[in-house]
Image: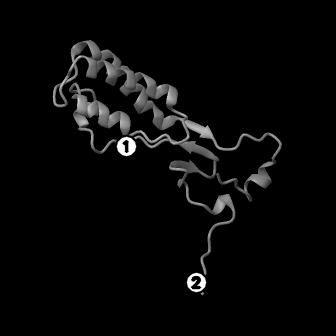
């Protein structure tokens, strides 16, 4: 028989775990967003070079938001992609200058997502002692 000792108390859990595809800080009981873009060139992420159509698509589609918390935020870059496609910009062509301000606005907001924390529990009636012992799993 295999014995697995899993933490029962939130305080015994690690500083950051994954639930529902999101990172979770159990001590604060908040969901956080990971904004690592390994496939997008660094000069694009630091705004030193305009991205290509493919890099814009790669950046936008690499944001995993299964629960829809960022849906409003992701509408702007998706509309930007539609406009780029309508103009007939090739996959390897850099973004036309008229779209650069929109891209920079999106990118600066995207980089600020590192500080976004969303509470997992919305119940005002549960006491903190109960929250440290029990969790709701969707």
Q: Residue furthest bottom?
A: 1
Query: Residue 88 at x, y = what percent?
Result: 21, 20
Which residue sits at x=38%, y=25%?
77
Quadrant occupied by the N terminus? bottom right
Residue at x 22% of width, y 27% of height: 48
**Closer to the camera, 117 or 51?**
51
* For the residues bearing labels 2 and 1, Cβ distance under 8 angstroms: no
Residue 74, x across and y down, in percent: 44, 28
- Locate residue 51 relative to residue 27 in the image: left or right: left
The answer to whether 128 is drawn above or below residue 88 in the figure is below
Comes first in the chain, label 2 or label 1: 2
Quote the CA–CA distance across marks 2 and 1. 36 Å
Quarter holding residue 81: top left
Q: Answer with the quarter of the image where residue 124 lies.
A: top right
Question: Which dot marks residue 45?
Answer: none
Dot 2, how many residues are within 10 Å of its Cα: few (below 14), some (14-19), or many (20+)? few
Element class at badge 2? loop
Q: Eyeballing the image, is 97 above or below 55?
A: above
Q: Position of residue 3 (x, y in %)?
A: 61, 81
Position of 138 with respect to 17 (left or right) is right
Mark 1: secondary structure: loop
Q: Position of residue 15 (x, y in %)?
A: 55, 55
Total count of labels: 2
Numbered tag placed on residue 2 in the rendering:
2
Viewed as shown, does residue 102 lie left or right of 30? Answer: left
Residue shown at 16% from the left, 26% from the top: 93
In the image, residue 113 above or below residue 120 = above
User: Closer to the camera, 112 or 66?
Assistant: 66
- The residue identified by callout 1 is 36
């Amino acid at each position: 028989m295999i014995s697995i000792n899993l933490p029962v108390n939130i305080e015994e859990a690690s500083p950051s775990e994954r639930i529902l595809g999101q990172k979770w800080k159990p001590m604060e009981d908040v969901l956080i967003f990971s904004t690592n873009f390994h496939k997008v060139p660094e000069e694009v992420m630091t705004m030193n070079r305009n991205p290509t159509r493919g890099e814009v698509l790669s950046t936008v589609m690499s944001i995993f938001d299964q629960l829809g918390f960022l849906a409003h935020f992701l509408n702007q870059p998706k509309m930007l992609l539609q406009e780029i496609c309508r103009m007939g910009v090739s996959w390897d062509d850099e973004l036309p200058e008229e779209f650069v301000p929109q891209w920079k606005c999106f990118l600066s907001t995207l980089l600020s997502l590192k500080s976004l924390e969303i509470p997992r529990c919305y119940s005002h009636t549960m006491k903190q002692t109960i929250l440290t012992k029990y969790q709701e799993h969707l």
